[in-house]
Image (spheres, rainbow, N blue to C red):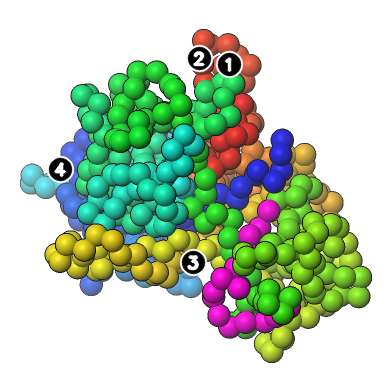
Amino acid sequence: MLLREIQFPCVENPPSCFLTFSDVWTHLSCNPSDGSTFMSKNRLGWEKWEIIVQDHNTGHSLIKHKASSRLLSADSDGNIYTQEAKDGTVADSSALWIIQENIVRSVAHSNLNLGAINTRGDLTPKVSPDNKNHAIVEYITGELCFFSSPDHDRRMSCGPMGKMSMSPNWKGWEVFRIIDVGDGSRHVRITSWTHDTKVLCHADQGRVFTSNNEFGMQSKWVIERPYGDSKGVAVKSAHFGSYLSYNGESFIMEDSIDKCSLWDISSAHQQKYYLSSVCHDKRIGYDNSKDNIYCSGKRNEWEAWQINSEGDGLVSFKSCVDGGKYLICTNGGKLKASHELNREALWQLEYSPNGGIFIISRNHDWHLSCNGQGLETSLNKGIGQTWILEPIMPSTISKDQKSMYKKIGIATVALSVAMPYAIMGIISSMGFTAGGISAGSIAAGMMSAEAIASGGGVAAGGTVAVLQSIGASGLGAAGFAGAMGAGGVIGASGGRLATAVMGKSEEQKNEGTSSSSNTNMAYCNWRHWE
């Protein structure tokens, strides 16, 4: 496996969802002003919820209303209400839930389902033993990617008016979100990142289009890699079995795979990050005109770094400026830039108790440090040595701007907006790798701490076990979100986690299929599926 080809996926976190009652196609909603819950046909802000894991061992999670930050709860009679979050925790189990096979179950009521009862003709949410009219988790976040045609060097794009086209650009219009349907199948939905209600669909006549909030069979796809072909993956209709293709002029659906139906999926942030100090609003920059590593309060090209996996839990940082060099640390702890990818350019990431990571020179054990005025290196491990990695997303436009452009007919503008994303798969670089847990890494430290706390063992389904499962298999969007958002129930909620690590088992390969599908790895790492 070529380690330099491994990409850290760009995954939206925490996972967001609708709580959907599919039999009647309504969604659980909450009024932010008074916290009351009700059923709604809308798919807007009031209907959006976030899943926040509380205990990786048990899978207990909070379900937080996105618009009000109130927590979904069930009283002693099973009635559904919301309560204010208290420092992210609650006093009892009324607001704790378990998500299994995309079904929401109340911890306080012996894992009975979140359901709905008919009250005088109206549906009322309530914890219920009814297995028919229950809420399912309908994820609306996922892995953010570009879909490029290798044959045409163009990317799928959903323009200002929501129309599908192909573009030579790498902007927000060209970013799409891959969302696991989450029903245990291999089905995914593909939505525009900029137009988050636009869903990629197809019709039986072969027409390809986007539709607002379409969640029927025409919006379900299977992403698979043809055996023996390394140029791309195929995007197959889950309903018709035909393949999404681009013939140089338009999108079409074809009955078989050829060069027009291959797609190169790559991460939306293109492995680019800002390295930001936790205690100071400062970033690491590189001035190529002076060949100087410096401390900066800006977020521009000079502060952007590309992170590459170099194996054994190590990474390199390469400046994104023209002629960019690698960040290196000399034996004396001096920070420099070099064209050479040598031992001085290798870094190890370790967990910091201050809410970030330590960035440590693998060759000399110096820690990157920021004192607020400049950069230095230190052997200490404190808040001054704690950093966060901010993924750099391509430019796009806001919802208000989209409305304005639709009204006045402008179709060629792209503006930068702030993107509140928390992250991305650097778990293998923390030391959770396919070969096991790397010595001296954050993973090793966490394993040691957990073993001491539990009397000598590491719990199955615990934090270390979950992270190692992600690092070993390189989980995709649903796997990552399921693991981090649903704790010990990742096998049930992840959708794609049942298959053997790194692809299909030999038994599955011998079932007569002609392709491999993603069951464990991120979509941007399709080259390493088996």
Residue wearing tag 4? 118
Q: Give the magenta-colored segment's residue range.
A: 292-308
Find the distance from the CA under tag 4 to the CA under tag 3. Answer: 32 Å
Given contact means CB atoms under 8 Å apart, are the residues at marks 4 and 2 in contact?
A: no
The residue closer to the viewer here, 280 or 234, is: 234
Within 10 angstroms of label 3, few (less than 14), some, or many (20 or more) residues?
A: few
Residue wearing tag 3? 89
Residue wearing tag 2? 513
If you read the primary sequence from the N terminus, does the residue marked by circle 1 or circle 3 appear first? 3
- Given this view, does label 3 or label 2 mark the residue nearer the observer? 2
Element at label 1: helix
Q: Given the image, on which type of amino acid does mark 3 rest?
A: Thr
If you read the primary sequence from the N terminus, does the residue marked by circle 4 or circle 2 appear first? 4
Residue farthest toward the bottom in the current orientation of the protein: 373
User: Does the magenta segment cover residue 384?
Assistant: no
In the picture, the quarter occupied by the C terminus is top right
